[in-house]
Amino acid sequence: MSDPTPASPSSPKQVARTIAAQLKEPNLAHLIGIVKHLGPERALEFLAQTLKVEAEGGLKILNGARRRTAGGTFFHLVRESLAEPERSKLFPPHNKRPKKPKKDALPGAGPTPSQPPPAAPAGPAPEEAWAGRAEVITALLKTEIGKATAMKVTLIGRPGKVSNQGQYIMFTMRGPEKTPSLPKGLPPMPAASKLVYLVYVAEKQWKKVAEAIQAPEDVLIVEGHLTWDEELKKLSIFASNITTKALEQAKRVGKQTKVEATP
């Protein structure tokens, strides 16, 4: 590996990007958090230590099964140099969960000595991490890419104009216009209102929903396999199952009626 450059980046984010580039470390968000906490000069000192360790053969993981990545060595050196509570702030234990307050605890009384407040997560806010995702993705694409064994999606909504191609049906769907609620910690998802999906449904399956979807208040529920149509430059979904909201509700009512009628 080459010596760390540039010598004096002007901001924590620039320093973090320098470290990420030198070590081919994709976790830019964590690096930014470390640089903000330690300061650029101290963070670059750890970078120099890491490059020296790597040049000398690197470090093994705890069980010795394999060599740490360069980024993993950097994080290890930083973590081992810190004392509590600084270490826990930058490297919170994955299995540590805040204790639930006792039932007789008074509201608003705050944490007791046996119930310390959870440490603030290291790194930038989700929005800041999202803004820097391009650098992370670029680094990830240069490493080993995972392999998906299946890809299934669900579309819920009204179809566009339906075209009968004989053995299969084609239609388009756009959106959704509203972004869904996401788990805490994720950045806001970009609106997908400009996305157009090409949907392919076997004629036999379509016959099951053709009449029901005529009702303007009903919606399709399409489960299928997602792929990219390179020729048309569109996302395409090949339906494996299709129903409507009204048909599903009627099915549940029928099951409930059957249960109630059972002696």
Image (cartoon, rainbow, N blue to C red):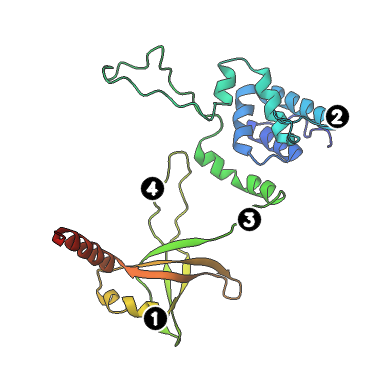
Give residue 240's position: percent from left, percent from top. 45, 70
Residue that sits furthest to the top in the current view: 113
Give residue 126's position: percent from left, percent from top. 50, 39
Kindly report which numbered mark, 1 or 2, lies closer to the viewer in this rendering. Answer: 1
Give the residue pinned by disc 3. Answer: 147
In the picture, the quarter occupied by the C terminus is bottom left
Which one is earlier in the sequence, the residue at label 1 or at label 3?
A: 3
Whether residue 161 can be seen here: no
Secondary element at tag 1: helix
Which one is earlier in the sequence, the residue at label 4 or at label 1?
A: 4
Give the residue pinned by disc 1. Answer: 204
Q: Nearer the viewer, residue 104 or 39?
A: 104
Q: Is residue 256 above or below residue 64?
A: below
Q: CA distance from mark 4 to mark 1?
A: 35 Å
Give the residue pinned by disc 2. Answer: 56
Q: Amino acid at mark 1?
A: Lys
Which one is earlier in the sequence, the residue at label 2 or at label 3?
A: 2
In the picture, the quarter occupied by the N terminus is top right
